[in-house]
Image (cartoon, rainbow, N blue to C red):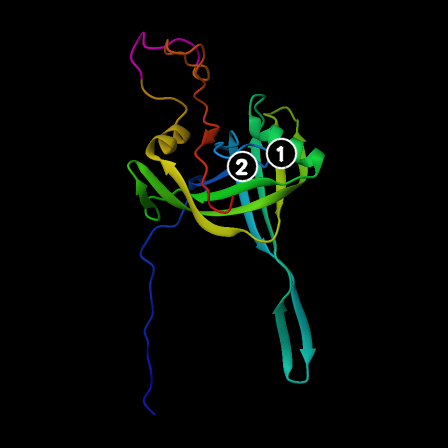
Amino acid sequence: MAEINNGITKYQGKPIKGNRVWYFIQSVKVPIGSPALLPAFQTEGTTTLGGDNIDEQTKMGRVIVKSTDEDAIELTQYFAPDDESINVIKDAKKEGTSVKVWRVVVSEEMAEEEGTGVKAYPSQFGYGIPDELEFDESDDLVEVSYTLNIVGKLQEGTFPLSDEDVNMIESLYNFQRPGETTGDYDAINDGTTTTTTTQPTTTTTTTQNS
């Protein structure tokens, strides 16, 4: 019998940096058409695709069968008083309800064109029930961490972001010339509105699995 050699496959791309994975949340109470929230000042995010297996020994050898799905998303961020995402988590924790959560990989290599100036990025979506909400109040910045236990399992899909959304999230403010605005960087007023907050906290939500 002739020997078979099917060769190998080698990946040529670059690994994804953690700062290109963004998490968005949304209250289950908001009406259809509402934007998703980008929790401010995210520092860490961990997605766990967990679950238990049935592991038994038989006369024919070991048998391992999937038993449960136990996916979870854990987020850490610095506390900002005006960050609505914290209130969404607090309310869900108090009331025992879930929140919608998206994990989005913002990589141009993986994005697909979805319209003029809009790209669809790979995403995972789920309904998460807050496990605990912890405020670390040391001498440094107040740090908030919480775990969202996913109901069922995370679903695969895409999340739409415009080029403007991405640029807004990546920078606190845009270039300007003297006299164009007034106010500090977190409350820029260009004269057309009373106060314009540039800290990114919202973006367009997807209709995938919602």
Write down the quadrant of residue 187 in the picture. Answer: top left
Left or right: residue 96 versus residue 105 is right
Q: Closer to the camera, 79 or 23? A: 23
Image x and y of residue 96, in percent? 70, 39
Left or right: residue 81 versus residue 7 is right
**Residue 58 in the image: above or below residue 21:** below
Q: Name the residue: 35% across, 35% down.
A: 162
Write down the quadrant of residue 68 in the picture. Answer: bottom right
Q: Name the residue: 43% across, 34% down.
A: 204
User: What range is drawn magenta here?
Assistant: 176-184
Q: Which residue is mark 1?
A: 89
Q: Which residue is mark 2?
A: 25
**Mark 1: amino acid:** Ile
Write down the quadrant of residue 46 in the picture. Answer: top right
**Mark 2: amino acid:** Ile
**Residue 156 in the image: above or below residue 133:** below
Image x and y of residue 134, in percent? 67, 34
Question: Which quadrant would the N terminus be assigned to in this image?
Answer: bottom left
Left or right: residue 10 versus residue 183 is left
**Number of numbered discs visible in the structure rendering:** 2
Neighbours of disc 2 within 10 Å: few (<14), some (14-19), many (20+): many
Q: Name the residue: 54% across, 41% down.
A: 101
Neighbours of disc 1 within 10 Å: few (<14), some (14-19), many (20+): many
Q: Closer to the camera, 210 or 194? A: 210
